[in-house]
Image (cartoon, grey):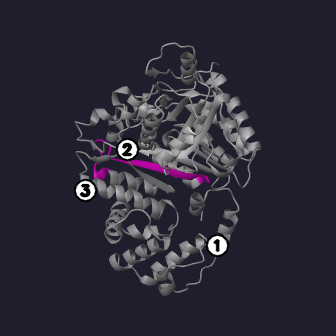
C-alpha cells in the first residue's frame, strides 16, 4: 500500500450505546490490506457533532468512512460539515441506505468525495486501491450485490466489551422475498443465503466467547435453511439463551412449530411481520400475505410454544382507514400476541411507496425520520392521535409492566378504540408522550379506570398491586397503598427464577 492513504477511520453512529454496527464490521473485515491501517470508532446519536469530529480527527486520518442511516443522517451531515471546514483535504466516503439513491440524495452527498451505493464489502477496498493507484474514480459508485461466499464474516470483530454490553447481531441471509413497497428490501432481486456451515462455525466461536443472546437481522428468516441453526442452539440450551428472528407468519410450518416447542419458555422471540390485516391494502403495496394463515399460525405459536411473539402494524399505508386499522389491530390482539408494535409509515429514500403519493394524498415530514403526516383517509389530527397511541401502547402494554391492568382499559369494548380513548385522555392529562415515570403512569391508569371507566377503586388498586408483585417491585404507588384491600406486595417466586435467566427484562415480564 502506498503512503497516499495510510490512515483510515471507519465510523458508526448508532441510535443507542447498546446497539452495535454489523455493517461497519463487515466493511472492516473485508478491507484487505487496508484493515491494519483502519481504526473503527462507534458513537451514538446522543453525542455532539463537534465531539465526534474531534475524536475522528485526533486520529489524523487520510480517509473517513461514514455509514448513513435514517437515524443518524442529520448528525452525520453535521459531522461531515465540521470536518470539511477544518480539514478540507481529508477524503470522505459515504455509504448506507440514506445516500444510496442519487435521485433522492441528501445534501451531504455533495460534500463527500465519493458515495458508494449498495453493498460495500468489495466496492470500498476497490475504491481505496484505485485512489492509491492514481486512477480516476467517479463520485458516485454503484456497487453490485456481493457473492456471500466471497466475503469475510465479521464476528471476530466483536470485542469482549461488545459481548458484555451490546446487542450481538448476526445474519444467515440477505435480501427479502417480499415486495412491500415501503421497505427498501423490496428492491432486492432475490434472497441470498450464507453457507450454513460457515454461519454455524461463526456462531460456535461467539458461543465459546460467552455470547448467549443472538439477534438475527435477516429480513425474513428462511426456516428450511435455518433449521440447522436452531438445532445448533438446541444442543446448547441453557438458562441464558435468547434468540431473535424475523418471520413471515403465514409461512410457518408444522415442523417448525414442533422444533420451537423444544425451546424453553422465553428463549426465542419471533418478530412476526404483519404490517396490515387489510387484504386490499396488502395487495396495493405489493405484500403477499394469507391473512387467515397469519392469524392461525400466530395463535398456534402462542398456544403451543413458549416463544415470545412481537408483531407489527403500520399506520398510514395507502388505503388503510381508521376503521380497517382498528379491525386489524383487534384481530391481531385476539391471537394472544405478546406485543404489537404500532409503527408509523416512513417514506424511505428510494422506496417504491412513493408511487402512491399523489393518488393517496400522502404527505410526509421532509426531515428524518420522514414519517407520514396525513393521507387521503387519515387526517393530520388523527395521525397525531395514532402516533400518541403507538407511544402509549408501547409503554403501557408492550413493555409488560401492566399485564393485568392494561386489559381493563378496553374491557367490554373494542380494544383499539378503547385504548385510543385512553391515549387521548392521557395526553390531555400529561401533555407528554415520553418521560412518564412508572409510578406516575400507574397513577394515571388508576385515575382513568376509576374516574372515566367508573371501575371499583379497590379492584383497580388490587390489579395494579398484582402487576407490581409479578415484576418484583417492592415499592407500591400511592393509589395502591391507599385503595388496595391487601396492599402488601408479595414478591413473585417465578420472577425470582426468571431473573436468573438470560431472557431480556421486557420479554421476561410477559412470561408472568
Check the image and report above or below for 305 versus 471.
Answer: above
Dot 2 or dot 3: first in sequence order is 2
Question: For mark 1, what is the residue?
Answer: 492
Closer to the N terminus: mark 1 or mark 3?
3
* Residue at the spot of label 3: 381
| Quadrant housing residue 24 | top right
In the picture, the disc for residue 368 is 2
- Find the magenta span and give its range: 304-324
Q: Residues within 10 Å of mark 1 (few under 14, many from 20)?
A: some
Residues under numbered marks 1 and 3 in contact, where contact means CB atoms less than 8 Å apart: no
**In this picture, residue 365 sits left or right of residue 14:** left
Position above or below: 227 against 336: above
Identify the secondary structure beneath mark 2: loop
The CA distance from mark 1 to mark 2 is 43 Å
Q: Residues within 10 Å of mark 2 (few under 14, many from 20)?
A: some
The residue at the point 33 percent across, 56 percent down is 386
Amino acid at each position: 500500500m502506498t503512503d497516499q492513504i495510510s490512515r483510515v477511520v471507519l465510523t458508526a453512529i448508532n441510535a443507542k450505546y447498546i446497539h452495535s454496527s454489523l455493517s461497519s464490521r463487515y466493511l472492516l473485515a473485508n478491507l484487505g490490506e487496508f484493515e491494519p491501517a483502519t481504526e473503527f470508532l462507534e458513537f451514538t446519536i446522543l453525542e455532539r457533532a463537534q465531539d465526534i469530529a474531534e475524536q475522528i480527527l485526533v486520529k489524523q486520518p487520510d480517509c473517513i468512512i461514514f455509514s448513513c442511516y435514517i437515524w443518524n443522517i442529520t448528525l452525520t451531515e453535521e459531522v461531515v460539515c465540521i470536518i470539511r471546514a477544518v480539514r478540507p483535504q481529508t477524503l470522505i466516503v459515504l455509504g448506507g441506505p440514506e445516500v444510496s439513491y442519487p435521485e433522492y440524495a441528501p445534501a451531504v452527498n455533495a460534500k463527500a468525495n465519493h458515495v458508494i451505493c449498495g453493498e460495500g464489502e468489495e466496492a470500498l477496498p476497490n475504491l481505496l486501491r484505485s485512489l492509491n493507484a492514481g486512477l480516476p474514480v467517479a463520485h458516485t459508485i454503484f456497487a453490485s450485490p456481493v457473492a456471500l461466499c466471497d466475503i469475510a464474516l465479521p464476528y471476530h470483530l466483536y470485542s469482549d466489551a461488545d459481548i458484555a454490553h451490546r446487542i450481538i447481531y448476526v445474519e444467515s441471509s440477505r435480501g427479502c422475498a417480499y415486495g412491500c413497497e415501503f421497505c427498501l428490501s423490496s428492491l432486492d432481486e432475490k434472497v441470498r443465503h450464507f453457507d450454513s456451515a460457515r454461519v454455524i462455525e461463526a456462531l460456535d466461536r461467539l458461543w465459546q466467547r460467552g455470547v448467549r443472546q443472538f439477534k438475527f437481522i435477516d429480513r425474513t428468516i428462511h426456516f428450511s435453511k435455518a433449521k440447522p441453526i436452531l438445532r445448533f442452539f438446541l444442543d446448547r440450551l441453557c438458562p441464558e439463551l435468547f434468540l431473535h428472528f424475523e418471520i413471515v407468519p403465514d409461512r410457518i410450518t408444522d415442523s417448525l412449530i414442533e422444533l420451537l416447542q423444544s425451546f424453553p419458555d422465553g428463549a426465542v422471540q419471533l418478530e412476526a411481520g404483519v404490517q396490515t390485516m387489510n387484504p386490499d391494502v396488502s395487495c396495493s403495496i405489493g405484500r403477499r400475505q394469507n391473512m387467515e394463515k397469519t392469524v392461525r399460525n400466530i395463535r398456534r405459536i402462542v398456544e403451543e410454544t413458549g416463544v415470545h411473539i412481537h408483531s407489527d402494524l403500520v399506520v398510514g399505508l395507502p388505503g388503510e382507514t381508521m376503521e380497517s386499522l382498528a379491525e386489524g389491530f383487534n384481530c391481531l390482539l385476539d391471537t394472544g400476541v405478546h406485543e404489537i408494535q404500532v409503527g408509523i409509515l416512513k417514506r424511505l429514500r428510494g422506496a417504491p411507496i412513493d408511487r402512491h403519493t399523489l393518488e393517496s394524498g400522502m404527505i410526509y415530514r421532509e426531515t428524518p425520520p420522514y414519517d407520514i403526516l396525513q393521507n387521503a383517509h387519515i387526517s393530520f389530527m388523527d395521525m397525531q392521535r395514532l402516533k400518541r397511541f403507538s407511544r402509549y401502547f408501547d409503554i403501557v402494554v408492550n413493555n409488560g409492566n401492566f399485564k393485568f391492568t392494561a386489559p381493563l382499559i378496553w374491557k367490554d369494548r373494542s380494544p383499539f378504540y378503547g385504548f385510543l380513548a385512553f391515549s387521548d385522555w392521557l395526553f390531555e392529562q400529561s401533555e407528554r408522550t415520553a418521560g412518564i415515570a412508572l409510578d406516575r403512569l400507574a397513577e394515571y391508569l388508576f385515575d382513568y379506570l376509576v374516574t372515566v371507566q367508573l371501575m371499583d377503586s379497590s379492584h383497580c388498586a388490587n390489579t395494579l398491586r398484582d402487576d407490581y408483585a409479578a415484576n418484583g417491585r417492592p415499592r407500591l404507588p400511592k393509589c395502591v397503598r391507599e385503595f388496595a384491600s391487601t396492599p402488601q406486595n408479595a414478591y413473585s417466586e417465578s420472577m425470582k427464577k426468571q431473573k436468573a435467566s438470560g431472557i431480556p427484562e421486557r420479554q421476561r415480564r410477559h412470561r408472568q
